[in-house]
Image: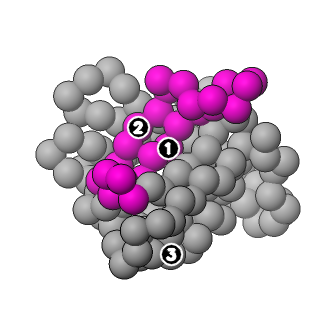
Amino acid sequence: MYTLSDRRAIDMIEENGELIVVISDLNSDNFIEFPVDRWKSFLLLQADIDDAVRQIENTRHFKYLRPFGDGWHVSVRRCFLYVDIRRYDSMNKPTNQGLTLSIAEWKTLLKRIPFLVSIERIFSPHVREHLENNNDVDQVY
C-alpha cells in the first residue's frame, strides 16, 4: 500500500485472478476499485486530468468532467480545487460511491502510476497480455 496523504492510500489487490487498483479513504470504509479495463481507461485520461488541474489553478471558470467506463466519471472543479472520481447513476447524476482527491493527492497519485503499471506488467502475465493486446478503449457510458 502507498499513501497519497494522511487520509488516502492506493494499493493493488488480486481478486479472482484479476489485479485491481484500489484507492481508499483511510478514515472511513470508502474506496474505489479499478479493474484492469477501468484502470486502463482512467490512465488514458491522466494527461487531460492533469491539464485540467493546471488550468483550475490558473483560471476561475473551468470545469472538466469525463466518463471512463461502467458509469464512472472523473471531474475537476474550481470551487474546491479537487479531482473527484465518482460513479454516476442512469440519470447521469453523481452518486455517493466515489472519492475526492485533493490536488496534492492527485499529484502524488501521478508519481505512483508508473510503478503501478510496472507491477501489473511484471507480476501478472495475463494482465500484461491484456494491456498489450487491447489498445482500444472500452466503451464509456
Q: Which residue is mark 1?
A: 85
User: Distance from label 2 to label 1 (Cα)?
Assistant: 5 Å
Q: Which residue is mark 3?
A: 51
The quarter of the image holding the C terminus is top right
User: Residue 88 appears in which quarter of the rendering?
Assistant: top right
In x, y percent, where is residue 103?
31, 61
User: Distance from label 3 to label 1 (Cα)?
Assistant: 16 Å
Work out whether mark 3 precedes mark 1 in sequence or the reverse, and give the earlier one.
3
Q: How is the image coloured?
A: one colour
Residue type highlighted by circle 2: Leu
Q: Secondary structure at mark 2?
A: strand
Work out whether mark 2 precedes mark 1 in sequence or the reverse, and give the earlier one.
1
In x, y percent, where is residue 78?
39, 59
Q: Which mark is residue 122?
A: none
| Residue 3 vertical placement versus 141 (above, below) | below
In x, y percent, where is residue 49?
52, 65
| Residue 16 vertical placement versus 56 (above, below) | above
Q: Is residue 107 visible?
A: yes
Residue type highlighted by circle 3: Asp
Contact flag, marks 2 and 1 (Cβ < 8 Å) = yes
Is 93 a magenta residue? Answer: yes
Q: Which mark is residue 99?
A: 2
Magenta segment range? Answer: 78-102
Residue type highlighted by circle 1: Ile
In the foreground, 10 or 42 = 42
Residue 60 falls left or right of residue 36:
left
Q: Main secondary structure of the magenta part?
A: strand
* Numbered disc total: 3
User: Residue 135 appears in which quarter of the rendering?
Assistant: bottom right
